[in-house]
Image (cartoon, rainbow, N blue to C red):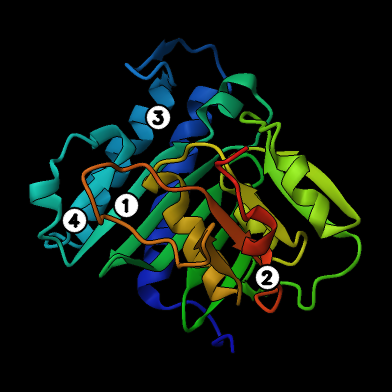
Amino acid sequence: MTAAGPGQQALDIAAIAQRAGAAILEVYHRDFEVTHKEDTSPLTEADLASHRLIRDELAALTPDIPLLSEESAEIDFETRSAWNEYWLVDPLDGTKEFVNRNGEFTVNIALIRRHEPVLGVVFVPVTGVTYIGEPGRGAWRYAEGESPQGIAVRQPCPSPAVVVGSRSHANPLLEKHLSGLGGHELVSMGSSLKFCRVAEGEADFYPRLGPTSEWDTAAAHAVVTGAGGAVVTLNGEPLRYNLEDSLLNPEFLVIADTAKDYPALFAGYGDD
């Protein structure tokens, strides 16, 4: 059941994400340089501007809660493993989409407590739409000047199902495993927007078989869970955070209709 609206902390975090989005758009609407990290992923001044704003504002709002951001990911596991709760941030999710100027990029801020996201905000700078998820309370969506409106996943799954996939990381094995789903429509898009489409009832399933990092998923994970869906590994276990030295997620499934056995579609994946 969805509460009347998001809690005050969630609204405060949404305001920070919106201000970070404004900083991103200042770069987006002019020429900018693109550099690359050691893993060859792109980096722009927009990533860094958003990171600095979020870092500083979270430190002012919650000085006792540590921060792990994509742009400050060098914190070692010995330190992180002692955290009971922390902010997990992707200051610009979908940098490739940002560079390609297709608008499909987001600001992601999540609060992780005991390895699970308990609050998540996803802000879409180009459209001005904010998604908030508070698992156990609900999920909401609103544009600038609007009041948050509750959103929920689509249950039961319709036929044909709408499946969302990555625009930048296509996987040729995906269609093979989706064959067991029956009729479906596959829609490609970037960033954590795929989770949000499931959360707001516009899509039914998002299987992610390619690499992601924990900051890519945590905020939108909270939105999906708050909306009544689930994010699980291929063996059906809940996706969890900060359990080991690596910050890479396992393959996972974002599910609207939790009554359907989506993990069964991927039995044997890895043996292909």
Q: Which one is in front, 105 or 115? A: 115
Picture quarter containing residue 74?
A: top left
Q: Can residue 142 be seen in this view?
A: no
Residue found 13% across the figure and 59% down from its top: 63
Q: Name the residue under label 3.
A: 47
User: CA gap, disc 3 to disc 1?
Assistant: 15 Å
The reply to whether callout 4 and callout 1 are in contact (CB within 8 Å) is no
Q: Is residue 143 above or below residue 39?
A: below
Identify the amino acid type marked 2. Asp
Q: In this view, does 123 lie above or below 151?
A: above
Identify the amino acid type marked 1. Leu
Q: Which of marks 2 and 4 is in front?
A: 2
Identify the amino acid type marked 3. Asp
Quadrant (top left, top right, bottom left, bottom right) of the N terminus: bottom right
Labels 2 and 1: the sequence-earlier one: 1
Residue 190: horizontal and vertical position, in percent? 63, 37
Q: Is mark 3 on a helix, strand or loop?
A: helix
Q: Name the residue under label 2.
A: 261
Labels 4 and 3: the sequence-earlier one: 3
Query: Dot 2: few (<14), some (14–19), or many (≥20) neighbours within 10 Å?
Result: few
Residue 242: horizontal and vertical position, in percent? 26, 55
